[in-house]
């Protein structure tokens, strides 16, 4: 039988209301009363019921992180970093996998059905920008990623256009002439990164060739492997490929290995995300490396600041620093 | 301004208590009253406050999954599978990363400080079996993994001794004579898998050589790469290595590539977990493949059965089916 508030009150010789006030850190309680109650709590090993307590206090010290996919190493690494960043501040992160489904994302935007969380860090996939703009979560929310929020929420994101420009320019600087892109398509990440890719080609006086821009069906190794097979079947295959995430690049590398082609000699490959997998791969993968620790730390800080009631109607947009990590897949 | 219970009551022309009874599915409400209240809820787009509601109903339809590490692909893939298995049953999974720390695991065993969750699926790392046995979570809990629970909780686990026996026997069947093991050590996974490894050597009349058993400092690529370097520096290096998880094996493969050694000709490599990374690697990785979908589905079903009040004092132990996937790293 669990110890109840009334047991603590009886042992401390005070009212239930007084015990409740001590637990909830209300002011105007004498040190002596507080000590008596705390001694009774310790003696009886009483554990306050947080659900009841949070209802009164309005804080649970839990935040939620809603991501499309846990099985994707980028989100897994990011989730781990956000969890650590929150823990340093005494906050526990609960992670919700939406699978990028509209219904699951709507549920997040609705404030996660009143779960006892103080706020949400949300990486949307399916929700259209217009819906994000009009959403009323009723809880502080920080957005991650490409999708513009129409100024409605705080946001933390990489400048994907610039980063993709840099990645493509690196391939151009190696003297490559037929540079393919894998992962174009959609209105989110694919569109933004293609913009940077095309911009770099244009700046170098190279025309973009639609036959070298592959959308695929997703952002997994499987899709990268299939897109690379399509590219190798072209009358004039590419001598370089910029994949819009590392998983696509790792799939493409597998296809190149199967075809007996040398990387980077025959085909140079660049990815995006800098997941651990690419660092250990043979050849190791050149990639855009967003500073995930910075991202995690700032997303958590921004959310906690908002939970504390700061920020007002100013919506903040933070840009995550990144580097281009040049490794074996482009001759580094 | 959010719609309140009293707004719904006013519109439906009933008492607040009646609205509350409808929301909480209490019996003895006429179909006509229910219809009136539901129409008012729809018209006003009223969203019940789940925190208050759960307190009365005692159910939130949320469960927690506590794992040591999200950034580890095995746990990321498992978390994704458990999340999907729960969603098929209308349950949302919130994932908590403990980093294998005692304090974080104690917090899980304490029922996660009264968070609004109906139960917990827990993969412990730091907590000693004795503490697991005496834990009193106050909430249904299903354990994952090697750690014996002393009959206290339901548990879902792979038979790691048998699986490690099979993996080692496969290397023996290839005619390898110096079979190393990476990842021994500790009292959990490392100890159990070493037992199966030694058992297989013994069954083949081969002595185990302590110099070929490497503990390393963890279960990451980094540790596998370092352990493999140690093994290659031996006067008589191994011709095969069984790594106790795929990350160790991927690290070992990188060291072998750097050393210019051929896999499997010079050194055959086997892993454990069957993460996607190993399937796409060149060479692809031979590994023990636990049926993660089966594991996820049964862990969720077991927990929900326990939440529903079934199972009594019988504690159930489910063994996850597995296969040995023979791929290029052992000549498959």
Image: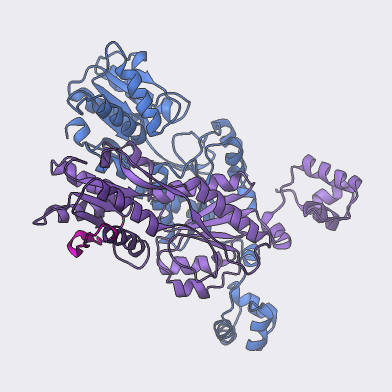
Chain colours: A purple, B blue
Instruction: Find out whether residue B152 is within the magenta segment.
Output: no
Q: In the image, which residues are magenta?
A: A203-221
Percent from the top left, x then y, of residue A317? Answer: 53, 61
Percent from the top left, x then y, of residue B192? Answer: 41, 27
Q: Nearer the viewer, residue A194 or B171?
A: A194
Percent from the top left, x then y, of residue A42? Answer: 78, 41
Q: Residue at x 61, y 67 (%)?
A: A314
Q: Residue at x 28, y 24 (%)?
A: B241
Percent from the top left, x then y, of residue A271? Answer: 31, 49
Q: Quadrant of the C terminus of chain A?
A: top left
Given the current orientation, which residue lies at the most extreme top position? B235
Q: Is residue B190 above or below residue A163?
A: above
Left or right, A230 with respect to B153, comes to: left
* Quarter location, residue B55: bottom right
Left or right, A278 with respect to B33, comes to: left
Left or right, B39 with respect to B258, comes to: right
Q: Residue at x 57, y 87 (%)?
A: B32
Q: Main secondary structure of the magenta part?
A: loop
Residue A51 in sight from this viewpoint: yes
Q: Nearer the viewer, residue A41 or B280?
A: B280
Q: Nearer the viewer, residue A69 or A158?
A: A158
Instruction: Find out whether residue A218 is within the magenta segment.
Output: yes
């Amino acid at each position: 039988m669990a110890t109840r508030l009334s047991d603590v009150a009886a042992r401390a010789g005070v009212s239930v209301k007084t015990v409740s006030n001590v637990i909830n850190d209300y002011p105007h309680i004498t040190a002596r009363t507080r000590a008596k109650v705390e001694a009774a709590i310790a003696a009886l090993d009483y554990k306050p019921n947080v659900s009841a307590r949070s209802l009164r206090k309005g804080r649970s010290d839990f935040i939620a992180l809603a991501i499309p996919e846990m099985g994707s190493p980028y989100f897994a690494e990011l989730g781990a970093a956000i969890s650590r960043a929150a823990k340093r501040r005494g906050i526990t992160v609960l992670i919700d996998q939406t699978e990028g489904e509209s219904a699951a994302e709507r549920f997040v935007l609705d404030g996660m059905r009143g779960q006892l969380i103080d706020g949400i860090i949300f990486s949307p996939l399916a929700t259209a920008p217009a819906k994000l703009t009009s959403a009323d979560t009723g809880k502080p929310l920080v957005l991650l990623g490409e999708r513009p929020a129409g100024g409605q929420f705080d946001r933390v994101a990489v400048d994907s256009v610039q980063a993709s420009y840099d990645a493509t320019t690196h391939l151009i600087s190696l003297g490559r002439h037929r540079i393919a892109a894998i992962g174009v398509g959609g209105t989110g990440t694919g569109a933004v990164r293609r913009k940077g890719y095309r911009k770099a080609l244009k700046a170098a006086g190279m025309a973009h060739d639609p036959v070298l821009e592959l959308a695929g069906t997703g952002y997994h190794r499987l899709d990268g492997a299939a897109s690379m097979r399509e590219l190798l079947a072209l009358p004039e295959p590419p001598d370089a490929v910029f994949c819009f995430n590392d998983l696509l690049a790792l799939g493409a590398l597998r296809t190149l290995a199967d075809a007996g082609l040398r990387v980077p000699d025959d085909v140079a490959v660049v990815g995006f995300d800098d997941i651990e997998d690419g660092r250990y791969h043979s050849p190791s993968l050149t990639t855009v490396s967003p500073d995930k620790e910075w991202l995690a730390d700032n997303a958590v800080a921004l959310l906690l600041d908002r939970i504390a009631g700061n920020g007002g109607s100013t919506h903040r947009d933070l840009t995550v620093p990144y580097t281009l990590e040049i490794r074996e897949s482009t001759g580094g």
